Amino acid sequence: MLGRFFPSSSKRSFASLSEQEVLALAISSEEDDARIYLAYADQLRAQYPQSAKVFEDMAEVEHSHRNMLIDMHRRRFGERIPLIRREYVSDFYSRKPDWLRANQTLEQIRDEAEAMEQSAYRFYTEAAKRTSDAETRRLLGDLALAEQGHEETARMLGEKHVPAEVAHEEAQTARRQFILTYVQPGLAGLMDGSVSTLAPIFAAAFATGDTWQTFLVGLSASVGAGISMGFTEAAHDDGKLSGRGSPVKRGLASGIMTALGGLGHALPYLIPHFWTATITAAVIVFIELWAIAFIQNKYMETPFLRAAMQVVLGGSLVLAAGILIGNG
């Protein structure tokens, strides 16, 4: 998107920047990074208040760097700071726009912050090499070391604001949110798609003996069920009061897994030989049902044997009903 407004031919090369422009670029970059850290703090504050404090402190560090750079610019070049930003410079490290950072997980945010500090370290290292003024070179070198040490700073701030028990609690909160937003609706969809389509698919198979017609029945049943489940999940709860997360994410998880659950045993009927297709579909059904039991055990803490009994027994009954109806 930035390339549309600042094509590469109109960007300045880093090597062409004057020392004043390098300082101006450093000032604007520190301002942007501080704003990004505050945005992360705002994003995390509701669920992870202690981690939010870490990013607030890191923003304060960036502000202090900015003030040091402004003081240096004032001493060397006066009050008027040129307007130059990172998107104006070719091959300069970039930051994700706000709309791409809005839904990141806590771990993704921490990884992004680490990458920000590493790229800032490389910038200050190169900038110091191109500066003839001893005082400016020393400042840029100090900032390079400071950026390199921000990982240690973040660790120390984490120990201050996020002790082990709080970090464990935040990890548990993140896991619960993942389960509520993705696992629960996805599991419900997989169960619905895998089990509810068994009867129509196998009934069509044994009633017609035609693999292509059976595939069409399975395809329509799977896609239709996926669309229905997706819209139902997205529409019945906006997630604000329940805390289950974005209805769009839940709807997609439910709809896609519903469709996949049905398509798993519909696709074998692309095989033209009836019994080969049917045996393959039955094997896939068996795998699907055990996969559901495994997910229930891993994420929903349902005892594995109980989950297997419920899912496999229920699926077997639906499968048997479909075969009986088809033969009837």
Image (cartoon, helix red, strand yellow):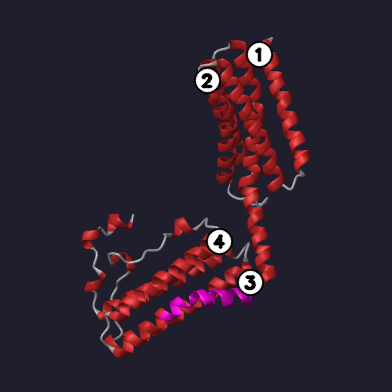
Q: Residues within 10 Å of mark 1 (few under 14, many from 20)?
A: some
**Location of residue 230 (image quadrant):** top right
Q: Earlier in the sequence, mark 4 or mark 1?
A: 4
Q: Earlier in the sequence, mark 2 or mark 1?
A: 2
Q: Secondary structure at mark 1?
A: helix
Q: Residue at x 55, y 37 (%)?
A: 256
Q: Quadrant of the C terminus?
A: top right
What whole-number distance in Å separates the C-alpha atoms at marks 3 and 1?
Answer: 61 Å
Q: Secondary structure at mark 3?
A: loop
The part of the chain drawn in magenta is 145-162
Say which residue label 4 marks: 107
Q: Earlier in the sequence, mark 2 or mark 4?
A: 4
Say which residue label 2 marks: 216
**Residue 291 image offset from top left, x and y in percent:** 65, 38
On the picture, is 44 further left or further right than 27?
A: right
Say which residue label 1 marks: 326
